[in-house]
Image (cartoon, rainbow, N blue to C red):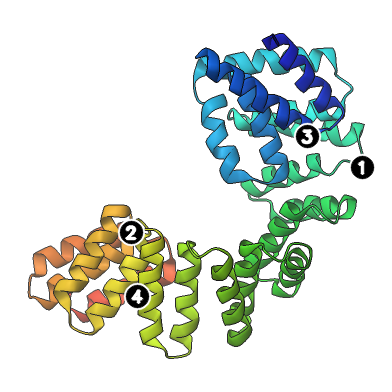
Amino acid sequence: MTTPTDHASRITEAMIRADWPAVADTAALWIAELSRQGQHDPRPYFAQNVVQLIRGAFAEAWRTHAKALQEEADIAAVRAWVEQITDAHPKEATIQLVAGLFLAQSGRSEQSLDRYQQAAALAPQMPYPHYFLAQIHERAGQPELAIKEYREVIKLDPAYLPARMNLGVAYQEQGRLELAIPQYREIIRQQPDDAMAHANLACALAEQGKLEPALLEYKEALRLNPNDAPTHFALAGIYEAKGRMDLVMKCYQDAIQADPTFSPAETATGWILFEKNRFQEAMEAFNRALKSDQNDAGAYYGIGRVYAARGKREAAWENYSKALKLEKDHDTKSKIMNHLFKEGGTWDV
């Protein structure tokens, strides 16, 4: 019978070899054995978490994280294991990388910075330390440093697509669409079925005003992933720009069908209904949005407008107040305030 020590040793050896498939396979065997015995050990889940992060499978990594590093006792057990490995192999780049991932995943991202830098110094040709350094810079609000690290990743491994995706997003957030678009196109060239790359490319093209190419990319993204509510919602924006309001409403309904908790689509539906004077249906849509997201400023503002249309001034202003407190976008907040002035009110914010 294979003991926990055997499993842990095999995982450590695979980590040193940078054999991530072997790490994942051994962790899966360990987890299956624990399940048969009715036992729990966070270490194999942490090993899985490491592999998922390296592969850029963040949704899977998040689910695994809960089994590895959510409880204090689990964090302590994994910490002891990682420290033992690091003490035994201080010059192994992959072990320093794993130590950095443990620190980052247990809420100590700033401390992980040194581990990633050590890993990069020990293995200059390994892309992963630069990838995770870039993420730390992003969280710290240092986009240029993040971009520098992502570019280094791609230089070391042009096929490492998670870095290309993040680099494209970083460029796009800066409005540098001419640099973002080639990253998305290269991902699609290497991996044609990447729905997110098609959706991101569509968004960037739409920002350039290229509506027809954007429309085609959004449709391809939805062909690959029909249950992506944000992409249905984004496609609605293209149809709205083209004046196809019938298709706009359909996109919102498709988004809600894909994800009944996707509040932006409910709020947007509410506004269309409001503009058609279908106040009761609009109110219902706004309330459904708030059921999913209690901080949806647009839904509160919509409810305020419905109450105002019904002559219920006090209820209207109560909801206007909530909308103004929650709205983060300066232009949208100014729009709300301008409307209030037209209604004959004043506001102190």
| Above/below status of 80 relative to 11 | above
Mark 3 or mark 1, which is nearer to you?
A: 3
| Above/below status of 195 relative to 72 | below
Q: Which residue bears the numbered disc 2?
A: 296
Q: Is residue 160 left or right of residue 257?
A: right
Q: Which residue bears the numbered disc 3?
A: 20
- The answer to whether the residues at label 3 and label 1 have Cβ atoms under 8 Å apart is no
Q: Position of residue 293 (x, y in %)?
A: 33, 54
Q: Quadrant of the N terminus?
A: top right
Q: Position of residue 183 (x, y in %)?
A: 75, 66
Q: Is residue 298 left or right of residue 152?
A: left
Which sits in the foreground, 285 or 134? Answer: 285
Q: Is residue 24 left or right of residue 45?
A: right
Q: Which residue bears the numbered disc 1?
A: 125
Q: Residue at x 39, y 58 (%)?
A: 259
Picture quarter containing residue 262? bottom left
Q: Which residue bears the numbered disc 4?
A: 335
Alpha carbon of mark 3 to alpha carbon of mark 1: how far? 16 Å
Which sits in the foreground, 137 or 268? Answer: 268
Q: Earlier in the sequence, mark 3 or mark 1?
A: 3
Q: What is the three-letter code of the residue carrying label 4?
A: Lys
State the SS at label 4: helix
Alpha carbon of mark 1 to alpha carbon of mark 2: how far? 46 Å
State the SS at label 2: loop
Mark 1 or mark 2, which is nearer to you?
A: 1
Alpha carbon of mark 2 to alpha carbon of mark 3: how far? 42 Å
- The answer to whether the residues at label 4 and label 1 have Cβ atoms under 8 Å apart is no
Alpha carbon of mark 4 to alpha carbon of mark 1: how far? 51 Å
Q: What is the three-letter code of the residue carrying label 3?
A: Trp
| Above/below status of 76 relative to 191 | above
| Above/below status of 285 relative to 159 | below
Q: Residue at x 41, y 75 (%)?
A: 251
